[in-house]
Each structure stands twice: as C-alpha cells, then as structure tokens.
Image: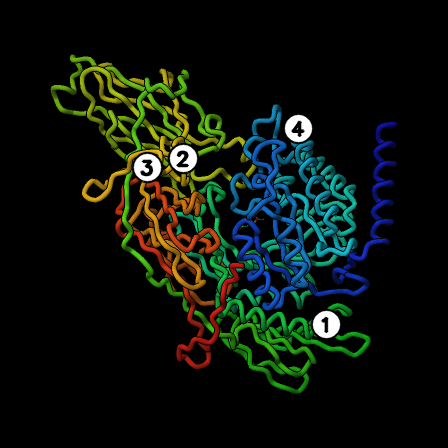
C-alpha cells in the first residue's frame, strides 16, 4: 500500500511538471493540431536519415525538401553509429547530427527527432550497438534493468547535446517534437506485463528529460499521456489517437518500400500516395511525414539483416542520389501547396461529411472567420465520376480527391498530374580500368592465427560483427578401407547454418555456395565431396549480411553454422562432425591486411595482365581512377560481379550483391486500388541492385583507389563507372526536354 502511494505521488508530480512545462513551452498540441507559438499548424514532414547521405549532400537535400513544400525534416538517431564501442562516441562526418539539424534550421525547417533508440529502419541491429547484446543479463526492449540503464544513458546523452546546442524549439532551435521507442505497441501486446511496465518507464524517463517539446510514440496505442500515439503505414485516414485531446499524426507515410537482395524494386504510384495523404487530411489529420523523402544509401555494413540492399532509394521523391524523382516530387509539391491554401479552414473547424453519390464523399471545412475548404473524393478504383457540389460539377478520375481551398475552385486532383516526369540515365564514363588481383587464401584448421574450440559457435558471438566473415575449420580422417574409394560413390557433406550465406571448401577447393532468402535466412548445404585417404581439410566460410533489425527479441537470433554438420556414406554410416574440434578465423586475410585501405593495399604483391584472377572465388581487386568531370552523381555498374563489398579511397560504399537476381511479380501496375509493397514492382529477373553510389565528396580529382572484394567469382574488366543524369519532361506534351537539371552542391 505504502509502495503504491509513493508511486501515485510520483505520477502526480510528473503530470504536474508536464502541465507546468507545457504552459511554458512554445510547442503544444490539442485535438486539431500541433500549436507552435500559439498557432495551430498543418505540418508536412519528410524523412532524411543523415548517415544515408554525406554532409556535402545535406544542404542540397534539405533545400529540395524545402522547395517541395515541407515544413519539417524527420530523422532517426542511429545509436550504433554514434557509440560504436561503449563510451567512445562518434559525431563526425555522416554522423554529425548537430550539423544536420542546424542545416535544417538554416533552411527554415523544423525537425522531428526520433531518438528511439530502437529505430528498426532496415538499419543494422535496428540501431543498437552490437556490444549491447553482451552486457550481462540484458534483454532488449522490455522491463530489464541493464537495458533500461543503457537506453536512458543514450537518450539523455542526445537530449543534453541538443539542449547544449540550443536546438529545441523553446530554446530558439528547430526541434518541435521527439520520439521515444519505435512501433512498440505490437511488442507490448505480445509480451504483456513486462512490456507495459517498460512503456510506462520509457514514457516517464522521456518526459522527465524536460525537452520543452512534445514526445510521440509511433504505432503504440497505449502511449501514456502526455505522449502522442501516431500511425505508420500506407494509409492512415481511419487512425484515431488514444485520447480525444491529441492531434492525429502520421509518422510514416510510406512513399515506396525498401529493396532486398533477391527482390525486385518496389514503386508506389504518386497518384495513390497523394490520394492517401489527401484522405488523411480530409479526415482531420494535421501532421504527416513521408518515410522516406530521401532514402539514400546503406553505406558500409549499415544495412540490416534479411538481405536489405545497399540502395535505400525507397522510390522516394528524392532518389538515392538526391535527384528529383518525378513526377513524385513535383506532384507532392503541388499537393502541399493545395493543402497549405486550405490550412486556415483545416485548423479551425471539423469537417462536415456528405455522400452525394456512389463511392463519392465530400468533406467541407468551414471556419467561423469565413474560410472554407472542400475535399471531393471518388473512391471507385475503376470508374471516373462527375460529382455535383455547390451547384457545380467536378470530374474526378478513379481513386482520386479534388481539393478546393475556397470551396469552389479545384486547384488539385490527386490523379491529375501536371508535374514533370523524369527519366534517369546512367552514362558510361569509364570501363577500361587496369585491374590487379590478390587471391584470398583458404585457411586450414592448424593455421597459426586461428582460435581452437570444441563444437560449433554462433557467428556473432565470435565476430562481434567486426566483419561479415567467419571461417569454421575442421578436418576429417579417411581410412584406406573406406568403401567409397573403390565404388567412387562420394560421401555427402551436409551443413546446416542459421544464415546468411555459406561457401564450402574441401582441401582448399570450392565445392559449393548457398545462401538464405528473403523469407528465411537459414540454409543447408548438401553436396558430394571428393575426399582422399588421410587428412582432409573442411573450411566453411560463413557470411552474415547484416544483423536483424526487428522482431521479438531479435538480439537472440543466431547466425552462422550451428549444425549439424555431417558426412554421410562412410563405412560407419554417418559421421557427425558438429561436436568435434573446430577452429575459427575471424574475417578475411585481406581484411586483416587492410587491403581496402590506401596504406594496406600496397602491403602485398598484386598480379595483373595475363595473371589477373578472373571468375575466381574469394579474390580482391584494385585499380585507380579519376573523378568524372562535372558534378553529376557517380556510380559503379557491378553487374559482372557476384557478391562482396566495394571501397573507394578506403571508405566502404556498401555490400555489393549483383549476383542475387530479383524474383517476383513485375506485371502491370494500376495506381487505383489498395497499394501493397508487392503491387508495383520493377526489375524482375535482373540483379536486385547493380548500381552502387559513390558520393562525389569521397573522390579526389585524380588517382582514386577502388577496391573490390569478390566472394563468388566475377569479371572485373566489365565493371564500369557511370554518371547519373536525369532528363525531365513535361507530362502533358510527351517531348523530351531538358527542363531542369539539378546540381549537387559539393562545397
Ligand atoms: C516501419 C519502421 C521503420 C521502417 C519501416 C519500413 O515499421 O518503423 O523504421 O523499418 O517500417 O521501411
């Protein structure tokens, strides 16, 4: 009882301090909207994740966001990028969060800071540092002390940093709201009591940090007051916040979807995207954030598990390279203009809804001061309609909404595109590189630099994610009495792995490669192996493709060869190798030598000319090249290669997996009707990703070092350097004209 009383008193103090601080704050909310400096606002926001581009690209991206009619830029905060090892922080380069926020401020934009620190986001380990998994007694995202201590420490660190830079709105900065956790509702629902306790703790912890601006929790119906619960998805018009005095917010308007290695390219037609947004606004929605507005690139090894590709283009209004993806960018810009014209009526009245005809719906907002805005909808996904409103007739294409900011003039229809369209081109710059190669060796069990252990170990436990690669090494003795030596019926090796890819070498020779898929990262290798009398070396190279970023207790999910590993077809029947002696070698020899770096690459002898290795698995390649003239974005066409990673001047431009061919359904796509991530796909039966972005600012004018590691075997002589240009053309007259060629600022 005494305990309960203390908790109640504490809760009262927290609520009181929240009320007091919201009375002081310049940002607050009511059921209609966010209120900034006393004014209700319809706020239009877009996600740009700072580490998915470079600081040199930020001003341009932010400027295009501003010109596209955004009020707010949203970003997650990426814990594992900022604290790669405990207490060692990184806020430099692509991780210069303060600089990114200040640039948004300078451009006149607000910021929504989704601190998380769980972010999901197709980002390695959902944003958590890998060392966190090894804190004693830790369990992620639940009522667990070690986790809560670590989470609070990081959230505090970020909030203090923002405060000391005066970045919250009441301090004169651009941050008008922050997010704690991310889509925790479904987890809480699944785990029950500890989940509820964790939610209550996270909410109190966040509010106590006294940022002076509201907190949100997305996809979290039980978000406690004063935290606002918000919606994520392709459509959110039907969403209601959990209290009648909270505004209706949509934190993730998915503009497309992410690409996975092995999957096609998802596209979302802008007519449907605009329709979804207009539906939300006509249903009293007052804040929406495009996820993503610029998707960018998963540089290095930042992409999450489940085969997330290096490109995070997302079919966003600004493409991976930062160029306008038209007509998406322009059609949304026009939508934003129309919505802003309606703002006075939208923020000061509730809609009156009528249904003048089949599949027709009309929403009218009329304020006391005389402003009037109407939204006319046609929900039919096949037929256009003539809708009568206030003695006038309006033509509405299928699945569309017309916006009338004065209740009379149609200034915009979600399916009538007047913006330009664009065609992106990858123009060949250079495909005549002078390549040199270096052969990665296959290690054996007794090599000096291996770790000897009994039995099979989980991969991340051994590598701590310092590399994608872990060698599992063992040996088998074959007696001269083995029957297969006479019959030629080779024994069969079976290797079971939790993922994500595996190369099997016997006595240094590659016998096979297997990899998991989109739905299931697990894999099994089964193959006949030529063994000889005496000692045979089995070397298994297990490859992780990023750590998972979501799912219940994803920190406990395994990778690597967990067994069983068996040899079938011996005199004794089946020999189980799983429990035998295994040695481990973390990473590749080339990684240890730093072949991807400028200094390391000159530490070994490379071969070239007629000695150049081609189509050989586990091979390093290097060359140098000059930067193409101009400032168009630059990329590599890697379609002649299989799988690996690419570095330019020592910086990783990401994993490359051009050999993973997209499977899926790439049929016709009609914008009308409910959209799903597999509805409008492109690029089936081609590599899921063949172009890899090299940021301009990573290049010197001359002599750039390009290093490729190839796992499968490929032809480096066919790698080409390209420049990306976009041709913009008017949608109403089909002639191609070079209307507008945006330039990247590389200052
Ligand atoms: C959401 C999540 C985002 C991102 C998105 C898919 O559920 O909140 O972080 O992962 O899905 O791109």
Query: In the rendered image of this protein, does residue 201 appear above or below residue 265?
Result: above
**Relative image position of residue 399 (x, y in whole percent):** 53, 70
Q: Locate residue 69: give its quadrant.
A: bottom right
Query: In the rendered image of this protein, does residue 592 appear above or below residue 159?
Result: above
Q: Name the residue under label 2.
A: 594
Where is the N terminus found, in terms of image quarters?
top right
Helix or strand or loop: what does disc 3 sit on? strand
Helix or strand or loop: what does disc 4 sit on? helix
Q: Locate residue 394: give its quadrant.
A: bottom right
Along the viewing direction, whichever of 498 and 471 lies nearer the viewer: 471
Separation of marks 4 and 1 at Cα, in angstroms: 51 Å
Foreground: disc 4 or disc 1: 4
Queried on whether the Cβ of the residue with tag 4 lies below 8 angstroms from ligand 1, the answer reads no
Q: Which of marks 1 and 2 is nearer the N terminus?
A: 1
**Relative image position of residue 531 (x, y in whole percent):** 20, 22
**Relative image position of residue 596 (x, y in whole percent):** 39, 40
Along the viewing direction, whichever of 695 and 343 lies nearer the viewer: 695
Foreground: disc 3 or disc 4: 4
Queried on whether the Cβ of the residue with tag 3 lies below 8 angstroms from ligand 1, the answer reads no
Q: Name the residue under label 1.
A: 352
Image disc number at residue 146: 4
Q: Locate residue 726: give its quadrant.
A: bottom left
Q: Earlier in the sequence, mark 3 or mark 2?
A: 3
The residue most toward the bottom is 391
The residue most toward the front is 702
Separation of marks 4 and 2 at Cα, in angstroms: 35 Å
Q: Name the residue under label 3.
A: 514
Q: Are marks 3 and 4 in contact (CB under 8 Å)?
A: no
Residue in view at x 78 percent, y 57 percent: 27
269 left or right of 215?
left
């Amino acid at each position: 009882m005494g305990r309960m009383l203390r908790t109640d008193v504490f809760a009262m103090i927290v609520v009181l301090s929240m009320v007091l601080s919201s009375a002081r704050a310049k940002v607050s909310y009511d059921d209609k909207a966010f209120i900034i400096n006393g004014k209700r606002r319809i706020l239009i926001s877009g996600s740009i994740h700072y580490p998915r581009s470079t600081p040199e690209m930020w001003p341009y991206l932010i400027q295009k966001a501003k010109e596209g009619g955004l009020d707010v830029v949203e970003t997650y905060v990426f814990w594992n990028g900022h604290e790669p090892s405990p207490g060692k922080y990184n806020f430099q380069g692509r991780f210069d969060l303060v600089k990114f926020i200040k640039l948004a401020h300078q451009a006149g934009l607000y910021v929504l800071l989704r601190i998380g620190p769980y972010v999901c986001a197709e980002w390695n380990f959902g944003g958590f540092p890998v060392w966190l998994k090894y804190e004693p007694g830790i369990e992620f995202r639940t009522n667990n002390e070690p986790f809560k201590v670590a989470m609070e420490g990081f959230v505090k660190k970020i909030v203090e940093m923002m405060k000391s830079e005066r970045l919250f709105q009441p301090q004169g900065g651009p941050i008008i709201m922050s997010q704690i956790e991310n889509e925790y509702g479904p987890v809480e629902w699944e785990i029950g009591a500890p989940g509820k306790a964790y939610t209550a703790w996270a909410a109190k912890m966040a509010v106590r940090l006294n940022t002076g601006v509201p907190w949100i929790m997305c996809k979290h119906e039980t978000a406690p007051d004063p935290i606002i619960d918000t919606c994520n998805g392709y459509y959110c018009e039907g969403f209601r916040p959990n209290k009648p005095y909270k505004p209706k917010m949509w934190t993730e308007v998915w503009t497309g979807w992410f690409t996975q290695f092995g999957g096609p390219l998802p596209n979302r037609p802008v007519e449907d995207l605009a329709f979804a947004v207009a539906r939300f606004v006509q249903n009293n929605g007052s804040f929406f954030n495009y996820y993503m507005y610029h998707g960018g690139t998963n540089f290095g090894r930042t992409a999450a598990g489940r085969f997330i590709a290096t490109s995070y283009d997302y079919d966003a209004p600004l493409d991976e390279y930062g160029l306008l993806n038209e007509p998406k960018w322009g059609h949304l810009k026009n939508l934003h203009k129309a919505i802003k014209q309606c703002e006075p009526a939208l923020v000061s009245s509730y809609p009156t809804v009528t249904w003048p005809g089949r599949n027709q719906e009309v929403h009218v907002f009329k304020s006391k001061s005389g402003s009037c805005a109407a939204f006319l909808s046609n929900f039919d996904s096949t037929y256009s309609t003539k809708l009568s409103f206030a003695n006038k007739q309006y033509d509405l294409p299928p699945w569309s909404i017309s916006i009338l900011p004065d209740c009379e003039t149609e200034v915009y229809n979600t399916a009538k595109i007047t913006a330009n369209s664009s065609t992106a081109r990858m123009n060949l710059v250079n495909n005549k590189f002078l390549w040199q190669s270096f052969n990665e060796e296959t290690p054996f069990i007794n090599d000096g630099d291996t770790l000897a252990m009994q039995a099979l170990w989980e991969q991340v436990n051994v590598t701590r994610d310092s590399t994608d690669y872990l060698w599992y090494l063992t040996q088998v003795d074959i007696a001269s009495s083995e029957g297969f030596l006479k019959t030629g019926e080779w024994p069969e090796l079976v290797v079971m792995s939790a993922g994500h890819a595996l190369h099997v070498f016997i006595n240094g020779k590659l016998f096979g490669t297997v990899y998991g898929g989109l739905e299931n990262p697990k894999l099994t290798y089964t193959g006949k192996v030529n063994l000889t009398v005496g000692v045979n070396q089995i070397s298994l190279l297990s490859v992780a493709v990023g750590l998972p970023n979501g799912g219940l207790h994803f920190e406990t999910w395994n990778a690597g060869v967990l067994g069983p590993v068996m040899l079938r077809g011996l005199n004794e029947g089946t020999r189980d190798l799983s429990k035998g002696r295994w040695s481990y070698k973390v990473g590749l020899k080339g990684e240890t030598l730093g072949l991807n770096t400028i200094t390391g690459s000159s530490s070994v002898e490379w071969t070239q000319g007629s000695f150049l290795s081609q189509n050989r698995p586990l091979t390093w390649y290097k060359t140098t090249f000059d930067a193409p003239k101009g400032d168009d974005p630059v990329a590599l066409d890697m379609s002649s290669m299989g799988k690996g990673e690419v570095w330019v001047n020592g910086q990783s431009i990401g994993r490359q997996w051009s050999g993973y061919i997209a499977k899926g359904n790439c049929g016709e796509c009609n914008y009308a009707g409910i959209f799903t991530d597999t509805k409008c796909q492109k690029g089936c039966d081609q590599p899921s990703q063949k172009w890899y972005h090299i940021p301009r600012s990573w290049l010197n004018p001359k002599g750039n070092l390009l290093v490729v590691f190839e796992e499968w075997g490929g032809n480096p002589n066919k790698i080409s350097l390209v420049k990306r240009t976009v041709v913009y053309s008017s949608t109403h007259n089909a002639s191609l004209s070079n209307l507008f060629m945006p330039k990247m600022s590389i200052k």
